Image (cartoon, coloured by chain):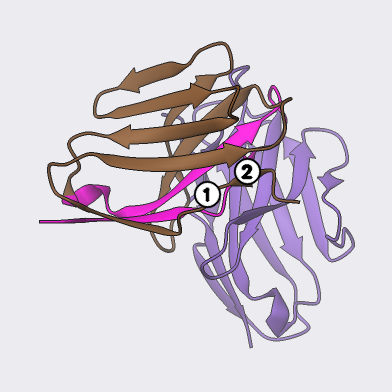
Amino acid sequence: DQQVKQNSPSLSVQEGRISILNCDYTNSMFDYFLWYKKYPAEGPTFLISISSIKDKNEDGRFTVFLNKSAKHLSLHIVPSQPGDSAVYFCAASVGTDKLIFGTGTRLQVFP
Amino acid sequence: GAVVSQHPSRVICKSGTSVKIECRSLDFQATTMFWYRQFPKQSLMLMATSNEGSKATYEQGVEKDKFLINHASLTLSTLTVTSAHPEDSSFYICSASNQPTGVAFFGQGTRLTVV
């Protein structure tokens, strides 16, 4: 049972444009959502998070949107840069319990 | 952000031997650490939750006698893969969390190859 889903395995975006990565979840008890960026053979790097009491959180070029009724969250990267090319994982947790990860979306930003 | 150090980053061992992987939180005390495993082109799969001073909680399907976890202090957790076999070859990653916000910081991962 995949509680956190990223249905797009890959995304290709031109430099300077917006990248939108999507994530769906099924467990309504999740109250904390996070996005991580991962390069091959490295551990994930925390990007941005949002609690269930909010619907938007912004940090520089990264904005996370949460739609609780749809059980959907998205990560917007504007403007996209070649250095953003990596695999992005969304994750969710109930309080400080274990993180449940999605399957990841490989983002490629081309010039 | 917080720093989590994992060692070694890469290890090759013979089948039947045991391998220990260390996970340290360098600038904060981690009451909880998590161990994940990642197969190629797949997501991070949680193996176990390690709590300081108590027994680890293993996820379903993870053999606790094969993957021994020790969390002896607030800054160190170890994962020992016992009697390793080629199918144990994988990328193992730890994370540490000590924040009510639930943000977990990850180590750099360990690539284990069993030959």
The residue positioned 42% from the left and 17% from the top of the image is A56
Q: Magenta stretch containing residue A86, yes or no?
A: yes
Q: Residue at x 69, y 22 (%)?
A: A95
As helix, strand or loop, the secondary structure at mark 2 comes to: strand
The location of residue B1, given as percent across then percent down, is: 41, 29
Look at the image and give the colour of chain A: brown
Residue at the extreme front:
A70
Which quadrant would residue B98 be assigned to in this image?
top right
Neighbours of disc 2 within 10 Å: few (<14), some (14-19), many (20+): many
Q: Is residue A1 visible?
A: yes
Q: Residue at x 70, y 32 (%)?
A: B32
Q: Is residue B49 magenta?
A: no
Label 1, secondary structure: give it.
Answer: loop
Which residues lie in the magenta part?
A82-111
Q: Amino acid at mark 1?
A: Gln
Foreground pick, A74 / B60: A74
What mark, if any, has residue A6 been given in the picture? 1
Q: Chain B appears what colour? A: purple
Report the side of B85 relative to A70 (left or right).
right
Image coords of residue B8 (percent x, y): 53, 62
Seen in the picture, residue B101 relative to B81 is either above or below; the reply is above
**Residue marked by disc 2:** A4
Left or right: B21 as drawn, with respect to B62: left
User: Mark 2 belongs to which amino acid?
Assistant: Val
Quarter of the image where the C terminus of chain B is located: bottom right
Residue B82 percent across, percent down from the top left: 80, 70
- A2 versus A26 height, above or below: below
